[in-house]
Amino acid sequence: MLRDEPQFARLFAGQSLSVLGDRVSFVAVPFAVLSVGGSASDVGLVAAAGLLPMLLFTLVGGVWADRFRRHRIMLVSDVVRFAAQGLIAVLLLTGVAEVSHLVLLMIVFGTADAFFMPAATGLVPLVVAPGRLREANALRGFVLSSGLVLGPALAGGLVALAGPGGALALDALTFAVSAAFLARLKPRETVPEAAKGTAAGTFLGDLRDGWVQVRSRTWVWSAMGAMAVYHVVVLPSVYVLGPVLAEEEWGGAASWSVVVAAFGIGSIVGDVCAYRLKIARPMALAAAALTVASCQAVIIGAGSSLAMIAALEAVTGVAVSLFFVLWETALQTHIPQAALSRVSSYDYLLSAGLMPLGLAVVGPVSESLGVRPTLYAMTVVAVPAALALLCVPAVRGLTAHAAGTASGTGGVQAAPVAGPS
């Protein structure tokens, strides 16, 4: 596929190295906080600081990405993230970093992220043929999953040899490489270039039109609701309580890296399945996969051996990859191209944008109730929410192709507002 789609290959190459750096930081940031004397609550606070800007800027990013060139928005975002992550690394390596420094710089980092994500989702259909969207998303997922395997192993070595600062310095460099590839990208345009940036609608009007695209499709808003629960309730167990248990009981960063790497191996399997399988009802399978993924909290807190936890996390990795590949492909297939970034911005707002709430709360709650009871309570909330998504008729009935097409070709740009609801 990469030979047939040279523009996607260019995007793929740039993002591949950047993702590896992100996976290094996934392990390094929590231990960076702990290395400067931070507590479990501080780990959650720093993680929340990186995600809080989603609440403020994701919708702005979605409107901008539907008005302006998406790859240029991504390029600027990469430059900002390079600067923010590089400064964090310098502060850590020079021994002057404090939790407050990490919080402020992660806010800058997260703001750039808020503009990057909607643009990235909307860019894929402009660099790949419509009929190959699922394959493209699976390849992107494969890179994310491979980073989970290679990144933690690299992070463990870097944290041991150079500390968290050295690991984050590598992550900063990967953003510079990604920006260089984006600068050479030449995606297709779906509207005349002269019209870019001169849309007649107001910002609020554009935002409202994007919301109409969401609320007119039951399968979209119900999936966003289920994902909000997953991000707020389940993922704090991975970002905060998992590293805390690893530090207290499993031997530190190296052991946590094993769990994260196992999850990554499972994710690779899920991406391969998404690439190869032809799925007639993608959202039905996605909802089932989200149910499995929602068991991560109880797996981490089960008190099993490290090997058993890693093996079960690998299973959830398969489920997580299947869900996100199928979800992104469904959006790109059934949502009009001109509104895709705005719809995805609502997606990020209602999922990752709300995640700081869970990250900020989970530390104090776990300190009050205990880590394991908190993890069990997370599961009791999250699994029923995912099962409820599977019960929605519009979710089970959504087809792999846009209405009025036999193969999905052209469906990304021509999909009507009506459809499965």
Image (cartoon, grey):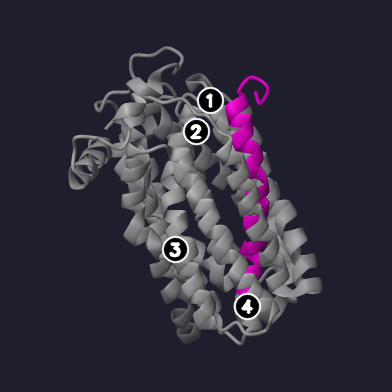
Which quadrant, please, contains the N terminus?
Answer: top right
Check disc 3 and report the residue beneath it: 51
- Helix, strand or loop at label 1? It is loop
Mark 1 in CB contact with mark 3 (< 8 angstroms): no
- Is residue 72 located in the magenta-colored stretch of the structure? no
Q: Which badge, 1 or 3, is on the more N-terminal residue? A: 3
User: Mark 4 to mark 2: distance in Å?
Assistant: 36 Å
Q: Which badge, 4 or 1, is on the more N-terminal residue? A: 4
- Helix, strand or loop at label 3? It is helix
In the image, which disc is placed on residue 124? 2
Disc 4 residue type (three-letter):
Leu
Number of the front mark, 4 or 1: 4
Check disc 1 and report the residue beneath it: 128
Mark 3 in CB contact with mark 2 (< 8 angstroms): no
User: Mark 3 to mark 4: distance in Å?
Assistant: 21 Å
Q: Which badge, 3 or 4, is on the more N-terminal residue? A: 3
Q: Residue at x 68, y 68 (%)?
A: 304
